[in-house]
Amino acid sequence: MDDRSLIEERNLKKKKRRRKRIIIFLVVVAVIAAILSFILTREVETVVVGPVEREATVVSNTYTQVIDLSGYVEPYDSQIMRFRTTGAVTGVYVDEGDYVKEGQLLASIDSTQQQAALQEILNQIEEAELSGSRRELELLKLRQASAEANLEYADIVAPFDGEIASVDVAEGDYFEGGDEVITVVDRSKLKATVEIDEIDMQYVSLGQKASLVFEARPDASVEAYVSYIPMLGRYTDQGIGVADVEFLIENPPEGIMPGFTFEGTLEAEGDVTMLLIPQAAITRSRGGSQSVTVKRPDGTREVVEIRTEYLGEGLAELLSGDLQEGDTLVYESRSQLGGLVP
């Protein structure tokens, strides 16, 4: 078959495919038109049921309030030690892991200039005491106190009983004042700061016990207690008020180290009673305020401002508002029924 015959055959096949697509398109259009015609020729009937007044009773529920906790533990105390003067290091007296007592000398820096300055002032004080110049003597005493403080700046001492967590200095090194040198930690106790929602803070008190479970010790529960409640809360990026509450573990078990994470619970002391109202009875204004209509025993009605938290299943917990268990709430509900009439 020559090239001309091949071209004519391809053109014939293209025409057939195009004709087939047109026929399919026309069939689809016809089907859609038939469906629309069927729907539009049927009568749509909508039955609207007007407002129906309903009543609900405020009920109470007694339960144990449990607050979920999560976070990580830190040393009870931790401090990064720095030289407060400049010079060459003349001595480092501890290694990482050493246990130290408060006031123990950890490292020293060259203090030749400070010693010389103090000695000069002491000599001047001796001369002033002989000459009897009271004013000059008072000034020299002040200079002596300053020189003694400068001399103390050349030494680093332990601020509390604890362990040496890190040593970043060696004898002969040259350091500027303010450079970090040694870290001291107290791991005899562990602490954790936990973010607690403002709604739950009413159930938190100092000394309250919590039960914590660590991933490092999933088979054991560790007891902690509330050791600090801040005077001020804070506002999160999600728009929630929270308080950073501190918990303390007095005797941390083996294997629990600073930085380890935990999950836990804090139970409120005694049972907690909450009032429940149906979510449908709550009216919300454009400003976000909430209210309900109370039907009094004499038949009168009163609108009461409230604040609630939605619990799910159509129920809300009353957080604030002048409502009592047994109060009758009235509210309207509307329903709409619709359908196609054959």
Image (cartoon, rainbow, N blue to C red):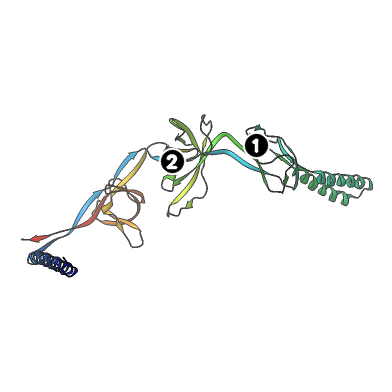
Count neighbours of disc 2 (C-alpha within 10 A) and say few if under 14, some if 14 to 19, many if 20 or more.
some
Q: Nearer the viewer, residue 238 or 109?
A: 109
User: Which residue appears at 86% of the width and 47% of the height?
Assistant: 121
Q: Amino acid at mark 1?
A: Phe
Q: Position of residue 223 (x, y in %)?
A: 47, 32
User: Which residue appears at 7% of the width and 67% of the height?
Assistant: 41
Mark pair 2, 1: CA separation: 30 Å
- Residue on which disc 1 sits: 160
Relative to 276, residue 23 above or below: below
Would residue 295 be seen by someone viewing this image from the given angle? no
User: Which residue appears at 52% of the width and 37% of the height?
Assistant: 248
View extreme (right): residue: 131
Would residue 230 be seen by someone viewing this image from the given angle? yes
Q: Position of residue 156 (x, y in %)?
A: 71, 40
Q: Position of residue 304 (x, y in %)?
A: 32, 55
Relative to 35, residue 73 above or below: above
Relative to 59, residue 299 above or below: below
Task: Report whether 318 appears left or right of 151.
Answer: left
Task: Report whether 117 appears left or right of 172.
Answer: right
Q: Nearer the viewer, residue 282 or 22?
A: 22
Numbered mark located on residue 69 in the image: 2
Quarter containing the C terminus: bottom left
